[in-house]
Amino acid sequence: MLENTEMRFADAEAMGLSHDEWLLILKRLDRTPNLCELGIFSAMWSEHCSYKSSKKWLKTLPTTGPQVIQGPGENAGVVDIGDGLATVFKIESHNHPSYIEPYQGAATGVGGILRDVFTMGARPIALLNALRFGEEDHQKTKHLVSGVTAGIGGYGNCIGIPTVGGEVNFHKSYNGNILVNAMAVGLAHADRIFYSAANGAGNPVIYVGAKTGRDGIHGATMASTEFSDETESKRPTVQVGDPFTGKLLMEACLELMAAEAVLSIQDMGAAGLTSSSVEMASKGGLGMEIDLDLVPVRETQMSAYEIMLSESQERMLMVIDPDQAETARAIFDRWDLDFMPIGRVTDTQRLVLLKDGGVACDIPLAPLVDDAPEYDRPYRPNELQPVLTSGSLICDFPVKDALIKLMSSADLASRRWIYEQYDSDVMADTLAASGGDAALVRVHGTNKALAISTDCTPRYVEADPFEGGAQAVAEAWRNICATGAKPLGVTNNLNFGNPEKQDIMAQIVGAINGMGKACKVLDTPVVSGNVSLYNETDSMAIQPCPVIGMVGLIDEWETAVGIGFTSVGEAIFVIGQPADCADGWLGNSVFAKLVAGREGGAPPPVDLDAEKAHGQFVREQIVLGQIKAAHDISDGGLLVALAEMALSGNLGADINIPESDTLLAWAFGEDQARFLVQVEDAVKFQALLDEHNLKGHQIGTTKDSQILTVGPDVTISLEEIRQCYESKLPEMMA
Amino acid sequence: MRVAILVFPGSNCDRDMMVAVEKITGRRPALVWHKDSQMDPVDLIILPGGFSFGDYLRCGALAARTPVVEAMLDHASRGGAVLGVCNGFQILLETGLLPGTLIRNERLKFVCRSVNLQLQPDHGSPLLSTLDPGHSLTIPIAHNEGNYFAQEDDLEMLKQNGQIAFKYTASPAFGPDNPNGATDDIAGILSSNGRVLGMMPHPERAIGNGHPSSDGKLLLRAILQGVA
Amino acid sequence: MEVKINISLKQGVLDPQGRAVESALISLGYSEANNVRIGKQITLEIEAEDASRAQQRAARMCETLLANTVIEDYSIEVADPT
């Protein structure tokens, strides 16, 4: 008989449901749900699983294009890369668990995103991440940076997938809420993509992977609530990952798919068996019956509720053709993994769970998915921050000192301390990893390569969500183009505070609008993504952080370039800036924060047509061999980008500066749509720029000595920059 | 030239090594699963990198006690050539075929970067005989337990018998170097008959064609020539 | 028989983990702590007629798998649950 614990609204409320949601459940079931059923509703209708606060706006994003095989709605997005191949990718957050237990939170974030990719039939070939931590001297920062780095490495290195790129920011708004977003990119045959929709009433439903324990019960709900001082006591809800089992599971699943012995497959991620069974069944327009007594468990006396809500890692749910069952079982036996038929697909469109000889749950699927709340939350944007003129931010500060200060800051210093803990070259296809613009990974067995980048400038988004949302896309676009690759698609991870607050909701709306416009103009549709809300502690919200993960393709990897200067005596051009430019946008820049001591202000505006034109030009000229090194200009501005090129190539440069009262703005302004490139033939290149009607001019020349000469008066040795650039993070983490 | 690569649950550099060997020999090496106790006769057995059995108990501890490793020990006892890379090196140490052990990196962090290796001039191995004595190689490492340790008497023996193959050395590119605290900067060692080589760095990640160097190809080719 | 095996690093083997933990203890104010070494404990049940037999079996297990005798020592405690 059904569990007869009589549920009341108070129980629903404790699970995070609103009164209206509770009433809707009563209406749809025409009775009171039991504990297990209520748990299933609360998980499926949680922010994390239903996207109720953001769905309305996410629907406005561009998600299609000739290169899109599968857009949002599946475990990951799929983009055609030609020659019968496709790339499968997604980014996902694990913010709240990582704050509580940084190693496991980050590790399971990596594990989860990898499963989302290989469940589609793609072998993962690269991992990236986007991390935000509190300010550098906050008491928890060192512990969190250390734990998260070790966790990402601990999982990625063990499972044998290279972690090839990422970004890290430090800011006080993340003191109580760090952000850990993990992105995975995989490779598949375009005609062998596996989807999650259940297929064929009567077909067996199989559970594979690790046994189920009590990990993370109600983790999806935790991700939908703010932290407070009670957070410490939430420790038991963090899941523990096992990358070794993850590796076995990945190999077994890929083998299964190569043998075409599976019909539908879904990983058990947030809300575990609940979300996977519900989604598989409802996508197929079918139902499912599961005997919970058959679920492999590693704890005794687990209740129906616990089994359904457990977030134990490294588990998958599959539907197979009965004729293929033996083939499938043999594969999993070889890898020593549990392979357990636990139920069957039905045509009732209901989820029925059996336990202890009775029925533990019997609910219609439609309300879980179709009736999942979709809110139109009210929003009221904050006033846009004022434009801060160069004059108001410039002070009497020597250029050299400013460059050193910026390069040695937590914002811009070398992240080597972090990325050398990641195995970046396992699988032996990595062409370029952390330290440059985009990561570059060869498409195994071909001459093609994928370029991948993760980007966001949260301070811009806070000041102007629309511009900031567009800027994240634009910066990713530039990073990809700067390698010579053609950007193809985007996965996004929206990290925001409490959407029930009107100014936060306005950030979400604005950022999505800006991002959408940029993706449209740049022809980089959004194919997958994730939303993480309620990133607030005691009501202090994070700087909004809509991370863009972008993937691009280069046809011949040998034509790709990096950021380091490659030859002596070659010309350095700035693209996107007229020759008579003597100023720059300092408002809301790294310079403004560190030297002028002034945060905030309107961010540099994004001209999407210019971004498109400049990116395309740079990419084309790289592939044609005209450009030998390229770097986009972003945080810290032109001089910082230049220093990064010099350090990377270990070559100096002579730079001409304009006559200017606002030289610091010229040097450190963060005007968008700009690149620095190294070219062999300056005359020819200028002609090319003129032909294409693009602004750009030579600003200097590379040279053999390890010195940057900036105008007649300023000489900076690379060694001096390198010293403070490389020592910042090791000192911070000592 | 028949080459076999052993594969354990959790091995993750087997494909990389297979690709490298195939590029050099023109022939795809056999991949042998850990449960196989019989192996076709081969000239060279390679134990690749990874996290066999999740590094449980100790790195390489469980892999060292599998049927396929029994077969490998048999091959080695008859003078057969064996190469163990990273986790493969850990496994060879666990079997006792090579002396000593690998413990946690001194700075307790996983480290992934290129290092400079110097071939020790007094090694007595046919596997390395076609390389110039004192030759320098740039090859990537990626490990958390690469810190070589042996008891005093074993160290003495290694030195006396020319069983130290490679040491980490300083270079202009990488500065002063011992990335993991290994005793005497030891990066790779040989068995007493010189036909078993264990090393921490990954030659299969330095075979040119977009890799940071092609010194790994040089090394693998030398080993294959030395085996023939 | 309930068997408890303690595996510890041999004297003289460098223990970087122990050293790091010691630094952390000291920086937390426990200046009285020193010589931290980190080992592991393995517990298992061994079917055997008596404690002595169980001890022997456990010792064999340590020699052949559980301990790396190059750098580790082991000690065994046997308890008869009856």
Image (cartoon, rainbow, N blue to C red):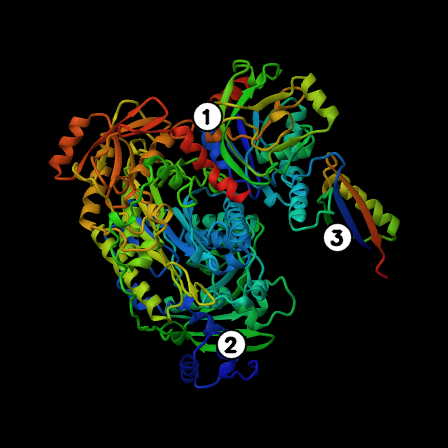
Q: As displayed, is residue A160 above or below residue A256?
A: above
On residue C43, which mark appears?
3
Contact between labelled residues 3 and 2, with CB atoms less than 8 Å apart: no
Q: Position of residue A490 (x, y in %)?
A: 31, 52
Q: Position of residue A485 (x, y in %)?
A: 28, 40
Q: Chain of mark 2?
A: A
* Three-letter code, disc 3: Thr
Q: Position of residue A267 (x, y in %)?
A: 46, 58
Q: Chain of mark 3?
A: C
Residue furthest to the front in view is A396
Contact between labelled residues 2 and 1, with CB atoms less than 8 Å apart: no
Q: As displayed, is residue B163 above or below residue A733?
A: above
Q: As displayed, is residue A430 above or below residue A105?
A: above
Marks 3 and 1, how far apart at CA = 48 Å
On residue A14, which mark appears?
2
Count neighbours of disc 3 (C-alpha within 10 A) and say few if under 14, some if 14 to 19, many if 20 or more.
few
Q: Residue at x 35, y 73 (%)?
A: A370
According to the picture, the residue beneath numbered tag 1 turns out to be B173
